[in-house]
Amino acid sequence: GLPARVRIHEVGPRDGLQNEPGVVPTGVKAEFVRRLAGAGLDTVEATSFVHPKWVPQLADAEQLFPQVRDLDVRLPVLVPNERGLDRALALGAREVAVFASATESFAKANLNRTVDEALAMFAPVVARAKAEGLTVRGYLSMCFGDPWEGPVPVEQVVGVTRRLADLGCDELSLGDTIGVATPGHVRALLTALGDAGVPASALAVHFHDTYGQALANTLAALQYGVTTVDASAGGLGGCPYAKSATGNLATEDLVWMLHGLGIETGVDLGRLTATSVWLAEQLGRPSPSRTVRALAGA
Ligand code: HMG
Ligand code: MG
């Protein structure tokens, strides 16, 4: 069966904007986060405390976070290492995410580390964050395919997921970073993870819509028991260190499907669409979301 309610983990301000070529003013980002919260999204991933040279768009994390931290929503931020955690803690962040890769190629491209070195880098981050009472998410990228390595074996993904879970992450988000997954592959991975002792209740899914499969993949995950789904308002996004990645699953497309299935989200689709139309005006190009275009009549 399907869940009665799904928690949407909104990643637009982080995953969506991190790939934008033109620098988006900090005030626009803060307004984006506020509007998303106002549309009923209760988890809005706000920014990343990564090296500013690696993701210049998010170099203003210190300026942005204080502008949004008093909102009454969960505001997770990405931290790759202890330096990132220090920066996030100094600003009062209550929720952080580390981000591993199932493949060596992307670990190198995204973190300048091997998979083992990246996990070793995260271990003290997760331990310290948990000791401070924070909620910790562990992302795992390239769970289905990798631009350099091709299809990624399920056993390889299960192995790294297990190790990430063992670090003490509260939730694991399975990323189809380049959007190549199909529903049968999703079912196969979730089943293998269940067999390895990682239940659906510990998982979130993070689909990109490169091949138009994100909603079908989401439905397969919901049928398996997953109830947390990552999405990006207006379908913004990509990944700066994975060239073939296009936008994330659009939050509006997700909400349209979920509400049609009678699944609660707490999201006001009209306000969310208006937010994406507003942001598209700021960025100077239309939203790629089919639902935004249909509802906004654009
Ligand atoms: P590195 O070059 O190996 O860094 O980068 P290092 O550890 O050798 O340190 C070099 C210098 O950087 C030092 O300064 C550090 O202090 C400084 P120096 O002593 O030379 O003056 N430094 C920092 N400064 C500020 N904040 C920090 C920080 N860390 C070190 N946190 C590093 C390693 C991890 C830092 C780098 O590779 C990095 O920042 N990577 C982040 C890349 C990124 O954000 N990618 C996008 C997110 S992942 C994603 O989008 C996928 C996801 O959406 C899921 C999916 O779709 O699959 C999550
Ligand atoms: Mg992503």
Image: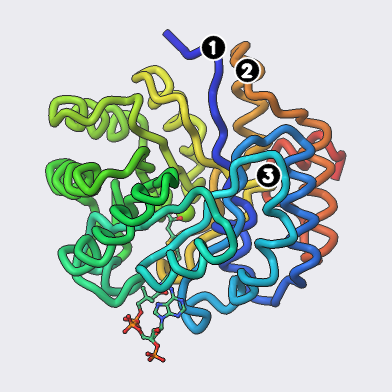
Residue at 63 percent of width and 62 percent of height: 17
Q: How does the figure colour the protein chain or chains?
A: rainbow
At which x and y percent is residue 80? 38, 66
Determine contact: label 3, label 1, CB under 8 Å.
no
Give the distance between the C-alpha atoms of the residues marked 1 and 2, in whole angstroms: 6 Å
Residue at 33 percent of width and 31 percent of height: 202
Residue at 17 percent of width and 30 percent of height: 192
Give the distance between the C-alpha atoms of the residues marked 3 and 2, in whole angstroms: 21 Å
Q: Which residue is mark 3?
A: 289
Determine contact: label 3, label 2, CB under 8 Å.
no
Q: Residues within 10 Å of mark 2 (few under 14, many from 20)?
A: some
Which quadrant holds the N terminus? top left
First-in-chain label (3 vs 2): 2
Give amino acid for label 3: Ser
Query: Where, by quadrant of the figure, is residue 257 drawn?
Result: top right
Determine contact: label 1, label 2, CB under 8 Å.
yes
